[in-house]
Image (cartoon, rainbow, N blue to C red):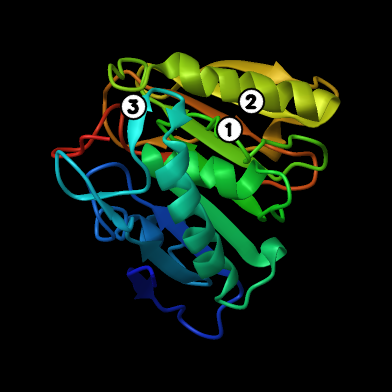
């Protein structure tokens, strides 16, 4: 099965690849506008794939979910290799590839970035998701880790913020002295900094807010790179069932 996707071309010769993965019940059009938000200069080839599964309550899905935190092994094992093949097939090296996603798409982002045997991308963006636990797809957080932007709504009543906090904690533990996690809460005010105090806090720029709703965002930055992340949602967009 070949995955369907939308493609936003780079302005010139692409310097890399930006892949954004939608959440449960959405489709390849859902995050397409964010390609220009994250890459306004259009330096990268932008791609938004569609989950290959059609499941209740409708829309496209990346896997079936019967228990939060634990994607259905049969459907995950069907879709994950397809997605990995698609991402790898564009001809860009892992060092040229940025992967991001929301909800189920964020879960697939974690899997593509951290499942053992997969190459590390240049960076990852995971919004309102969790690190998946699936037999045969063990997560490997050995160093070096890529920069990871993590965003999660504090009032999220579908996937509680504690799921992404657990990912944050695991990355901090794995990165030890080299991780930076910035916490933004309530109208985007800078709420705290955790990580290695020997590193310059200016190495990571804080996420910018787009809506005046309570929000919690973490930007875990490896010591090798910097980056910017924008997180416009505190919970699901209209119609997103996740």
Measured as percent of width and height from the top left, residue 213 is found at 27, 22
User: Residue at the spot x=31%, y=37% of the render?
Assistant: 210
- Mark-to-mark CA distance, 2 and 1: 5 Å
The numbered dot on residue 66 is: 3
**Which circle's residue, 3 or 1, is located before the other in the chain?**
3
Mark 3 residue element = strand
Mark 2 residue element = strand
Residue 199 visible in the picture = no
> Quadrant location of residue 240?
top left
- Mark-to-mark CA distance, 2 and 3: 31 Å
User: Residue at the spot x=61%, y=75% of the render?
Assistant: 15
Measured as percent of width and height from the top left, residue 53 is found at 29, 53
Measured as percent of width and height from the top left, residue 19 is found at 47, 60
Q: Which residue is mark 2?
A: 181
Indicate whether 70 appears above or below 125.
Answer: above
Measured as percent of width and height from the top left, residue 191 is found at 52, 14
**Which circle's residue, 2 or 1, is located before the other in the chain?**
2
Which residue is at the front of the view, 65 or 213?
A: 65
Mark 1 residue element = strand
């Amino acid at each position: 099965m070949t995955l369907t996707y939308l493609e936003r071309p780079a302005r010139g010769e692409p310097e890399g690849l930006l892949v954004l993965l939608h959440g449960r019940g959405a489709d390849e059009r859902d995050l397409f506008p964010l390609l220009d938000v994250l890459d306004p200069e259009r330096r990268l080839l932008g791609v938004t794939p569609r989950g290959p599964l059609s499941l209740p309550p409708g829309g496209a899905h990346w896997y079936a979910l019967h228990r939060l935190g634990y994607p259905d092994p049969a459907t995950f094992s069907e879709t994950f290799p397809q997605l990995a093949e698609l991402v790898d097939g564009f001809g860009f090296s892992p060092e040229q590839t940025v992967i991001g996603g929301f909800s189920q798409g964020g879960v697939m982002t974690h899997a593509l970035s951290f499942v053992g045997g997969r190459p590390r991308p240049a960076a990852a963006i995971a919004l309102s998701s969790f690190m998946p636990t699936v037999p045969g797809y063990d997560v490997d957080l050995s160093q070096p880790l890529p920069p990871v932007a993590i965003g999660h709504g504090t009032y999220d009543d579908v996937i509680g913020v504690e799921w992404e906090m657990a990912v944050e904690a695991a990355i901090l533990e794995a990165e030890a002295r080299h991780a930076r996690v910035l916490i933004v809460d309530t109208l985007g005010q800078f709420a705290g900094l955790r990580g290695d105090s020997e590193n310059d806090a200016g190495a990571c720029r804080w996420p910018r807010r787009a809506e005046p709703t309570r929000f919690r965002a973490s930007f875990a930055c490896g010591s090798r790179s910097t980056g910017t992340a924008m997180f416009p949602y505190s919970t699901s967009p209209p119609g997103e069932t996740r």
